[in-house]
Structure formats: structure tokens, C-alpha cells
Image: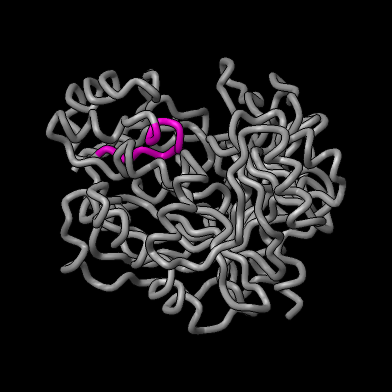
Amino acid sequence: MKVLVIGGGAREHALCRSLSLDPDVTALYCAPGNAGIAEVAELHPVDALDGDAVARLATELGAGLVVVGPEAPLVAGVADAVRAAGIPCFGPSGEAARLEGSKAFAKDVMAGAGVPTARSYVCTTPEEIDKALDAFGAPYVVKDDGLAAGKGVVVTDDVAAARAHALSCDRVVIEEFLDGPEVSLFAITDGTTVLPLQPAQDFKRALDGDEGPNTGGMGAYSPLPWADPELVDDVLETVLQPTVDELRRRGTPFSGLLYAGLAITSRGVRVIEFNARFGDPETQVVLARLKTPLAGVLLASANGTLDVFPALKWRDDAAVTVVIASHNYPDTPRTGDPIDGLADVAAQDAPDAYVLHAGTRAEGDAVVSAGGRVLSVTAIGKDLAAARERAYTALGRISLDGSQHRTDIALKASEG
């Protein structure tokens, strides 16, 4: 099968890496890709938000499967255009992707499905905002209703900061704060059958100790040694399957990757948010542990045959990924800085540790930074402590002027 992946971040590099290792994949393409993806896939230029352009490219390449990585193309209906061209596509329709594209829509779906989540208000005026902030009190949780590349959420004890963020949004969801650790759980679905993957935990704050501003994610690990062994089954029963059933009942079946961001609260599991695609950086660690070849399960989702797909197989190893970000991230990042040491990691740490590119581009023989999150250093090991050591050892070989990374990814979990 020929596979075309749409996107150009570390999530897409992780997808392309796994697909490149799948013996059933005879040709692998990525559009637009990045400097690292170019090592495992043939790159093609495309406007990822233009469904017709993506469908044309897939047709020209003879792709038997298109995998849409980022959320913005999904919300823009790119998967619909690909399917209309007669090509199987992994990713929800534009209508179903509203589950991520509108937090208010997601809350409405959860209400219909009986899915446990935080109490919330949808606000469009200053008066509604003030009323909602007063109703919940600190800590304040304020979410831009639309897509914001993982940076549309503010959690703060400062009511002025909460109000300022709310006023900067056209439409905002203000909700109660959920206590307890957070978990990311992905599930592959064809609109009826739901196949959960292994849970992961990511680190949203920019600085060690969960300090600093919210980011798109600074690292992740899997498995979660502290989590209830029944967690995945419980979430499948109370969250994932009811949500997929409710969307199908509404006439907007969801096929693709359903991502549940969860809080394990003192009152039980609550949904923080849904995403309509693989999460970044959790994808890096989840796919590092997946033994089942990836293309077949994605194609089964696209073709509606997950009910007869064999159970997924997982390696016992733990996985850790650490993000290297540009100077000034998550504010306007500095780009164009040369990256050194990538060949050293490949020579000295592979295959147990490797680098996935996020915001990079090639300039002649050099690779330079081209975004806020630049690289994900991913490693596996017999346990989290071993995976952590390998990841940080490999990270230490990489040089990027002004870069930043957290030093505590998976630290507490690895210490038991």
C-alpha cells in the first residue's frame, strides 16, 4: 500500500517513522513534511488546508491511504475531500472534527452522551464572562472555543489574567477546575468500533515543576505505573464508546483518532477536552510502544472494518520523549538557528533513542530551527528510569543555540 501523510510536525514524523517500518507500506509520502521526515518519506509541497489540493496529490501519487495528522486540516474538511475522491482516509469529517474545533460543541456532545466532564459556561459577552468567573472562583479555567494550536487554554489564580484571556476570544468556555493528575488516552475508531491505545501523560507547562505558560506539550511518557489497571476499560465504557455512539446517532459519525484528555479527580474520571487527531507529544511515546504494524489498523478505521481487526500488540518497554523548543517559546520563537548533533544521536543511541523533527527545515546540508517546538528526543527502556536516562543522554548530544527543554519529564513516575 502507498500511504500519504499530511502534516509536518513531530507527530507526523512519529507516524511516518512507524509507517516506514511497516512491511505492508510499499511507498511513503508526506506533505509538506520537514527535514527529519525527509529521511523516511518522499516529501511533496501542498497546502494542507486545501482539501482539493490534498485529494489531487493523493490521486497523482496513487495513494491507497491518506493519514491527516493536524487538527486544522481535519476541521477544514480535508478528509471529506479525500474520501470524495474515492481514497480511504484516516481522519474524521469536518463535521465530526468539530469535537475539537469547538469546545462548546464538545460539551454538547458530552451532555448528550452522558460523559462526565467539568461544569462549564459558554460566554460571548463581558457580562457572561464575569458571571462565569464569579461562579467558579479560582483556579480559573478559560478556554478559547476554537482551535488555538494547544495554546488556547489559561489556568490561573489571577482573575484579571483569566478575564483578559476570555475577552481576547470571540467565544469562550469557562469551566470548573478539575483536580488530580491528567491522562491522555487515544482511541482508533471507525465510527462504531472503538480500539483504545495505551495511555500516556504529557507535560503542558513550559518549565520544570509544571511552572510557566501553557504550551503545546514539552514531553510525555508511557506507560503510567501509577494508573488504575482498569483505567482504559473504564474510559472506553464511560467516555469513548458513548461519545462515538452519540456522534453516530447525530448523523456525524466519527472515524479516525479520538483523543480524550482526562483528569483523574477525587470524584472519578472527567473529560478535560477531546481532540480529533493524534496528540503531540504523546504520539511519540505511544507509537514507540506499539508492536502491531500501523498501516493496517489505520486502514481498518478508514474502511470500517475495525470489528474484525486483531487485538493490538504492545511492547513491555517504557517510552519517554523530551521536547527541545526554540528560544522564547511559547511566545514568538526565534527560528533559523542551526542544529548540531543529530548524526551523533543516530550513530550512538539508535535504535533505543532517536530524534523526531517538529519545527525544522533543511538549508543545504544543514538543518535549522523553523518553529517553536523543534525536536522530540524519544527513547525506550525496560522501565521509565531507563527510558529517561537514554532520552536525556541523547538530548545532551544536540546543540541548538538558545534552546530550552524540561529536565523533569517522567521523573516522578520513574521514581515510583
Residue at position x 28%, y 18% in the image = 53
Residue at position x 53%, y 41% in the image = 10
The coloring applied to the image is one colour
Above or below residue 10? Residue 157 is below
User: In the rendered structure, does residue 70 fall within the stretch colored magenta?
Assistant: yes
Above or below residue 195? Residue 339 is above
Residue at the left extreme? Answer: 86
Foreground pick, 247 / 194 = 247
Residue at position x 48%, y 40% in the image = 102
Q: Considering the image in quadrants, where does the C terminus appear?
A: bottom right
Q: State the image quarter where residue 87 is shown.
A: top left
Extent of the magenta region: 66-75
Residue at position x 73%, y 44% in the image = 154
Q: Position of residue 31 (x, y in %)?
A: 38, 27
Foreground pick, 234 / 278 = 234
| Res. 78 in view | yes
Judge left or right: residue 99 versus residue 176.
left
Q: State the image quarter where residue 86 is shown.
A: top left
User: In the rendered structure, does residue 336 fall within the stretch colored magenta?
Assistant: no
Q: Considering the image in quadrants, where does the N terminus appear?
A: top left
Judge left or right: residue 161 versus residue 274.
right
